[in-house]
Image (cartoon, rainbow, N blue to C red):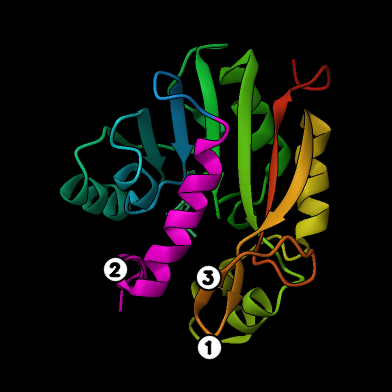
């Protein structure tokens, strides 16, 4: 099964859809509908499907992901690399990463580019798979899992790197029990850690 096929299968499952709903609801706390939002590493556009009334552009390095995203959702999608975002300096209100940063190696260059395009009081929202959780650990060990491509397998350390580029906070959410989404803010069980904040003097 191709990456796109397995993403479509996940996102169309009841469980995958509940995960994406919860992540979208979390991100909506930090953005307004008229904000210019870049969703970097948008995959097949699951977030855009849930942001229909928002000014959001999805960007992904994979042509296959972007092609599928365009077929599924009428939002603008671009093929592009996070290290060279197609946006002017200080032009964007929000940059969002959902389960993307942990798959990219040159994290400092990525954060430099994300904070370049953000206006000084713009918001960066990074939703990162929590490697302390049972859900992420079991997927890391599962043969053929996309999670095995994770470059950063210590989400605490990755969140710290993000917090070096922004003035922000770290939270945990999205508990998973038996393929059901439950509320959890426990750092050892929540499937996701989120880092949210504005560019700081290290980055601007
Ligand atoms: C685990 S998927 C997450 C997709 C989507 N955000 C979601 O939650 O459904 C990670 C995505 O990051 C994309 N990606 C990896 N490296 C990238 C890069 N350098 N620039 C842009 N996108 C990248 C991959 O193609 C993939 O679609």
Identified at 28% across, 70% down, the residue is 5
Which circle, 1 or 2, is nearer the viewer?
A: 2
Q: Residues within 10 Å of mark 1 (few under 14, many from 20)?
A: few
Name the side, left or right, on which 30 lies relative to 187. left
Q: Which residue is mark 3?
A: 181
Please provide percent x and percent y for residue 170: 77, 45
Q: Which stretch did the figure color magenta?
A: 1-30
Q: Which residue is mark 2?
A: 12
Cα distance between the residues tagged 1 and 3: 23 Å
Please provide percent x and percent y for residue 73: 22, 45
Residue closest to the eye, 51 or 141: 51
Which circle, 1 or 3, is nearer the viewer?
A: 3
Determine whether the residue tagged by mark 2 lies in a helix, strand or loop. Answer: helix
Query: Sequence-wise, which precedes: disc 1 or disc 2?
Result: 2
Residue closest to the eye, 142 or 31: 31
Can you name the residue that lies furthest to the bottom here? 143
Label at residue 106:
none
Tell me the chief SS of the magenta region. helix
Cα distance between the residues tagged 3 and 2: 15 Å
Query: Sequence-wise, which precedes: disc 1 or disc 3?
Result: 1
Identified at 16% across, 49% down, the residue is 71
Name the side, left or right, on which 165 lies relative to 80. right
Q: Is residue 135 above or below residue 113?
A: below
Please provide percent x and percent y for residue 91: 50, 12
Name the side, left or right, on which 62 lies relative to 144. left
Please provide percent x and percent y for residue 31: 51, 28
């Amino acid at each position: 099964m191709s990456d796109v096929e397995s993403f479509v299968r996940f996102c169309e499952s009841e469980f995958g859809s509940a995960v994406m709903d919860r992540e979208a609801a979390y991100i909506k706390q930090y953005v307004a509908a008229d904000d210019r939002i870049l969703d970097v590493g948008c995959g097949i556009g699951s977030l855009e499907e849930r942001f229909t009334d928002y000014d959001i552009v999805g960007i992904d390095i994979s042509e296959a992901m972007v092609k599928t995203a365009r077929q599924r959702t009428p939002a603008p999608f671009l093929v592009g690399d996070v290290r060279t975002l197609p946006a002017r300096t200080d032009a964007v209100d929000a940059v969002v990463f959902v389960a993307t940063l942990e798959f990219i190696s040159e994290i400092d260059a990525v954060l430099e580019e994300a904070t370049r395009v953000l206006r000084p009081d713009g918001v960066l929202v990074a939703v990162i798979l929590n490697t302390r959780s049972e859900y992420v650990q079991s997927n890391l060990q599962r043969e053929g899992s996309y999670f095995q491509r994770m470059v950063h397998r210590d989400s605490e350390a990755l969140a710290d790197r993000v917090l070096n580029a922004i003035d922000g906070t770290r939270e945990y959410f999205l508990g998973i029990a038996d393929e059901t989404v439950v509320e959890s803010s426990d750092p050892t069980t929540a499937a996701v850690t989120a880092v949210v904040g504005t560019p700081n003097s290290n980055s601007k």
